[in-house]
Amino acid sequence: MALFQTKKIQSFIVFIIVLVVILWVFQDNFLKLLAFQKPIEQLVSINEEATETAYLEKIDNFLLKEYSKDQVLLHSIQAKTYYSYKNSPVQLVDVEVKTFNEAQKEGLVLTSNRAEMLKSGEMFFNGEVNIQTKTGVSHELDTESLIVLTNSGQIKSNKEVTYLGETARIISEGMEMSIESDTMYLNGVVRILEDSGVTIDTMNLYISHNAGEKTYKSKEATVYRSKDNIVNSDSGIDIDMNLRIIKLLGKVEVLNSSGSSLNSSNLLIDQSNGGEVLKSNSSSYFKSNTVDIKAKKMHYDAVTKKLELMNKVVAVYE
């Protein structure tokens, strides 16, 4: 029994000696590890402190109302969360801006996921923005920057704007709109991308939803492109989105993928029922590799590829 205890004590002494040797060999690395751990703890502490002090003030369920000198409510700004910063604009999350007329009836309502508010009263929106006019018309936009001038009642953007329509997307270089109007002005180069695959290139497009209408209008040169046809117009376009009717104004040239061409003016394109029918009641001139035809009216179904030239038709075969 005594022998067993002696061996046990000897084993414990050997373990202590080995442990001391290991600590002595690795003492430099151990000290470096302690020195490295301290800056990490300090860095974590600094980052947590920076996060807590990133904004000066945070307000949940923020609401701001601005009144005239006569205490008439002009507009209200409501947000899920309000953040204020020392040297940066106020940030608003899930924001809604409402305007009011002199009778205190609600006018325009503008909603967005995020917005910035300046001390001047101007507001900048980015991302998806929904604009609902006083008549209930809704305009949905996606843009990098949209400014609301609450004092002048104007909404503007000088960045690329994507207007999200029911059956088309419209991309422009900017936009302007009055709070009191149902008409939006998309300025600069404009491209209309229809869900059907048709593209329309023009400039300075007006979008009007007055009295239930949905029209897109431009007085600038326009190019209409579909699967088999390119139509050039020198005086603009007038689109009725409710009726699915496109009017290409002024002198018009139709270029077909077959190589034929047709010149006319004030061309109507009927897209109702998923079709594409080109019509004109003006003098028309059709030209192909084998024939030249002049007529007073024309009707062309792009789906069935059937062309009708009517009234005082003159044909010259080559």
Image (cartoon, rainbow, N blue to C red):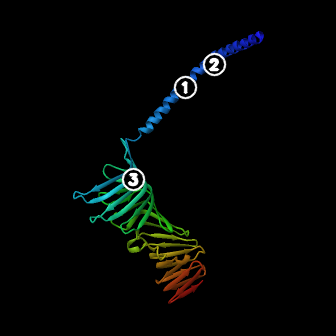
Residue 25 lies left or right of residue 116; in this view the side is: right
Q: Tag 2, which secondary structure?
A: loop
Q: Tag 3, which secondary structure?
A: strand
Q: With respect to residue 285, does 43 lie above or below?
A: above
Amino acid type at image mark 3: Ala
Residue occupying image coordinates x 33% and y 65%: 180
Q: How crowded is mark 1: few (under 14 residues within 10 Å), some or many (20 or more)?
A: few
Answer yes or no: do the residues labelled 3 and 1 have beta carbons within 8 Å?
A: no
Specify which label sits upstream in the sequence, 2 or 3.
2
Amino acid type at image mark 2: Phe
Numbered mark located on residue 36 in the image = 1
Residue occupying image coordinates x 46% and y 70%: 222
Task: Please name whichever residue, 283 or 272, is drawn nearer the observer in this view of the structure.
Answer: 272
Q: Position of residue 181 (x, y in %)?
A: 35, 67
Q: Where is residue 175 in the image (x, y as percent from the top left)?
A: 40, 61
Residue occupying image coordinates x 37% and y 66%: 133
What residue is shown with label 3? 79
Numbered mark located on residue 26 in the image = 2
